[in-house]
Amino acid sequence: MLTREFLKSADCQSSFGPIEESLLLSAEQRTASLQTFLMNKPSKGPLWVFGYGSLMWNPL
């Protein structure tokens, strides 16, 4: 089950098996992506986030 505790403690490779390295962002790349997003987000109004359930769920 996908829980907050799981997300805090797990990493992709130990949870889902081998993943091609070119598909994963480094910690530095994730930080840069977050910083870019935060600098470019609208300063006022709502922020819409779209998530598609089947992309967030791994049945294995």
Image: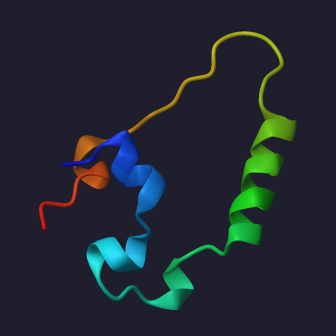
Q: Nearer the viewer, residue 21 or 42?
A: 21
Q: Nearer the viewer, residue 52 or 30?
A: 30
Q: Given the current orientation, which residue lies at the most extreme left position?
A: 59
Left or right of 55 on screen, residue 22: right
Q: Residue at x 79, y 38 (%)?
A: 38
Q: Given the current orientation, which residue lies at the most extreme right position?
A: 39
The picture places residue 59, in percent across and down from the top left corner, at: 12, 60
Quadrant of res 10:
bottom left
Q: Residue at x 51, y 30 (%)?
A: 49
Classify 19 as above or below 53: below
Left or right of 41 on screen, residue 49: left
Classify 42 as above or below 45: below
Tally the numbered discs: 0
The picture places residue 21, in percent across and down from the top left corner, at: 52, 89
Q: Residue at x 64, y 13 (%)?
A: 46
The picture places residue 29, in percent across and down from the top left corner, at: 73, 68
Quadrant of res 30:
bottom right
